């Protein structure tokens, strides 16, 4: 009987192809939107988790100015850090490794190739602090860092652009007027939490960047890896106390620097992410509801149009339950068509968005199954009222209908 | 020969529509017994109650007073689902407007009652073919109703009524939409089914020369039976009519 009802439903749906398509469009859009939102959301939180790992565990970032992000508020002069600040942090027992950072942007030239990239001036601790691995050659040495020797370590993207697959260790690259010897190459990390290319960087001794590229002795930030067993709150308090003292900040005055736990930033990003995708998914769910109402509307029209058919079936011996089943199955099949099309459209959208925003494409079978079941449920809920109307018809009235 | 068992029995049946001032007594205390194997024509002017009587006989409607016994079962106390079962297993309907499902092949139309009986697909097709053959339409199973003439459509409808092996075929103005030649064919077919298959036939008509194909004539006036007599001049005895 069910098999028969499905056959009948398919026939009646295919008989009015355009009408059926327009009817299920609401469900298609709803399901597609939910699938796309959830898939993109899961992809980007997977990516955030991956980049939390790659940031290095137990890492704090110290920056001049209040709060970590955004431009400094006008009027408050920013007091930069110096290398002595970094040395002072390094003496704290909570700090296992400390890397001062001085940033610069410059064009690197090697033979005929050149690439504009960001240069990170730092010390030999940086790969440890920021969780980088030197894949080829070696790390900077403390002597090179102290002397500001003209040496550099390339990120994979820079290496690719300047040397292709060739081994660049021992080769020279030119940055402005400096001729720099390549001593190492970093292992690739891939895209970061904002989709940026983390491998597009060059490491150099910090004094070299300060003197020869920036022409000052500013330190833009200090990255700290905490000692094992030290909690991030404890580490932050110790660093704040030290920095307030060094910068002569009186009691009751605000910090003119910030200490940020990168894990906190990542988890905040993640929660913003999930709130956003939850919000968008519920908007999409509303569209599913609207799609269900569309199905109900068309099923009511269909029941009225087929009043005579219903009368014939009742006279021939169909029970009202069988008539109910027939129209309910039709609504569910219609809705499932919409659901299946919506799943494919949604996955395609998520894939496209993933390529566009360089987010991994991670379709979740559970979510797809849920969408499928949910569209069936939409069919049952919104198909029930029209089907009941069909089932409750008086056969005499229905046969007289023209 | 013993008297055949009564199949349809009205005991003081009435059917009242509306209440109070607007009350209409479509049937007013009707007694009627139809035995197995009869061919009864019901006649009467419009509003005489003949259609109401047909609806009650066909288990599409219930009497509001009196008793209707179908195969000795009191119908007025049965549920809607039980009525559907009675229709499914014992009754076949033939309508004036044919009432075939459009855009559905003749064979599938005939299979319809068998689907509700739960007959498996292969047997269903075989029985539907057989029913089509009985009405002289073998080979037309694939045609849609729109591709068939009125007479052929009515034959498909009769085949549909036959497919469920009914005890009774109820024909409501079966020739109302047909010309006289096609009408005669349909009436001879009904006579033949009555004579050879022993199927009881109850037919509503308002034309005396159509009613003349039956063996018994019942005339309704104002909700009561005013005449009930054997048909004296049976036009073409089915037994002699070669088909």
Image (tube, rainbow, N blue to C red):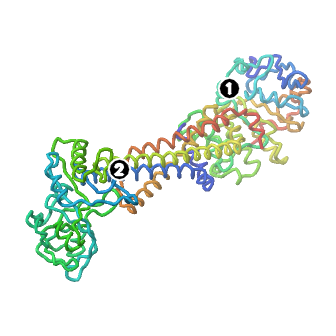
Question: For the residue labelled by badge 1, is the local secondary structure a helix, a strand or a loop?
Answer: helix
Say whether residue A109 is left or right of residue A264: left
Q: Residue A169 sits in which quadrant?
A: bottom left
Q: Position of residue A113 (x, y in %)?
A: 24, 80
Closest to the observer, B205 or A113 = A113
Residue A328 visible to the viewer: yes
Q: Residues within 10 Å of mark 2 (few under 14, many from 20)?
A: many
Say whether residue A386 is left or right of residue A33: right
**Above or below — where is A171 with respect to B243?**
below
Residue B228 visible to the viewer: no
Say whether residue B202 is left or right of residue A237: right
Closest to the observer, A230 or A388 = A230
| Residue under pointer 1 | B80
| Residue under pointer 2 | A45
Quadrant of the image for the N terminus of chain A? Answer: top right
* Image mark 1: chain: B
* Image mark 2: chain: A
């Amino acid at each position: 009987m069910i098999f028969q009802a499905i056959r009948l439903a398919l026939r009646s749906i295919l008989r009015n192809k355009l009408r059926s398509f327009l009817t299920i469009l609401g469900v298609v859009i709803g399901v597609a939107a939910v699938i796309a939102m959830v898939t993109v959301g899961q992809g980007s939180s997977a990516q955030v988790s991956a980049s939390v790992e790659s940031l290095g565990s137990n890492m704090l970032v110290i920056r001049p100015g209040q709060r970590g992000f955004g431009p400094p508020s006008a009027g408050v002069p920013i007091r930069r850090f110096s290398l002595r600040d970094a040395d002072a942090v390094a003496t704290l027992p909570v700090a296992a490794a400390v890397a001062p950072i001085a940033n610069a942007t410059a064009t690197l030239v090697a033979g005929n190739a050149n690439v504009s990239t960001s240069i990170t001036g730092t010390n030999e601790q940086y790969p440890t602090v920021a969780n980088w691995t030197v894949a080829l050659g070696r790390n900077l040495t403390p002597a090179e860092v102290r002397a500001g020797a003209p040496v550099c370590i390339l990120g994979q993207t820079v290496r690719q652009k300047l040397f292709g697959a060739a081994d660049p260790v021992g080769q020279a690259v030119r940055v402005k007027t400096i001729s720099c010897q390549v001593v190492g190459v970093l292992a690739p990390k891939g895209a970061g939490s904002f989709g940026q290319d983390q491998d597009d960087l060059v490491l150099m001794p910090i004094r070299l960047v300060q003197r020869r590229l920036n022409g000052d002795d500013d330190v833009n930030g200090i990255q700290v890896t905490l000692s094992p067993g030290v909690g991030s709150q404890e580490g932050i308090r110790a660093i704040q106390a030290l920095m307030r003292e060094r910068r002569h900040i009186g009691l009751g005055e605000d910090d003119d620097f910030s200490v940020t736990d990168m894990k906190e930033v990542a988890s905040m990003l993640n929660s913003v992410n999930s709130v956003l995708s939850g919000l968008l998914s519920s908007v999409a769910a509303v569209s599913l509801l609207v799609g269900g109402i569309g199905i109900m509307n068309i099923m009511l029209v269909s029941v009225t149009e087929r009043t005579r058919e219903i009368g014939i079936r009742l006279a021939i011996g169909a029970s009202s339950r069988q008539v109910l089943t027939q129209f309910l199955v039709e609504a569910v099949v219609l809705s499932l068509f919409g659901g299946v099309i919506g799943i494919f459209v949604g996955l395609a959208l998520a894939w496209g968005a993933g390529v566009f925003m360089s987010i991994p494409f991670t379709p979740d079978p559970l979510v797809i199954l849920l969408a499928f079941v949910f569209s069936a449920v939409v069919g049952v809920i919104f198909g029930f009222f029209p089907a009941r109307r069909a089932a409750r018809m008086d056969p005499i009235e229905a046969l007289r209908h023209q | 020969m013993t008297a055949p068992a009564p199949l349809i029995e009205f005991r003081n049946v009435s059917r009242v529509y509306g209440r109070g001032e607007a009350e209409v007594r479509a049937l007013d205390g009707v007694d009627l017994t139809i035995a197995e194997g009869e061919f009864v024509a019901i006649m009467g002017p419009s509003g005489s109650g003949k259609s109401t009587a047909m609806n009650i006989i066909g288990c599409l409607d219930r009497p509001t007073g009196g008793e209707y016994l179908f195969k000795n079962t009191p119908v007025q106390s049965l549920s809607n689902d039980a009525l559907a079962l009675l229709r499914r297993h014992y009754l076949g309907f033939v309508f004036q407007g044919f009432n075939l499902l459009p855009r559905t092949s003749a064979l599938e139309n005939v299979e319809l009652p068998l689907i509700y009986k739960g007959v498996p697909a292969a047997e269903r097709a075989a029985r539907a073919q057989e029913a089509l053959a009985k009405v002289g339409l073998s080979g037309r199973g694939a045609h849609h109703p729109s591709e068939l003439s009125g007479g052929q459509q009515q034959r498909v409808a009769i085949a549909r009524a036959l497919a469920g092996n009914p005890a009774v075929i109820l024909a409501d103005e079966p020739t109302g939409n047909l010309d006289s030649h096609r009408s005669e064919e349909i009436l001879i077919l009904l006579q033949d089914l009555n004579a050879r298959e022993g199927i009881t036939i109850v037919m509503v008509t308002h034309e005396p020369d159509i009613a003349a194909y039956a063996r018994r004539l019942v005339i309704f006036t104002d909700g009561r039976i005013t005449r009930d007599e054997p048909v004296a001049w049976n036009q073409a005895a089915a037994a002699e009519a070669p088909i």
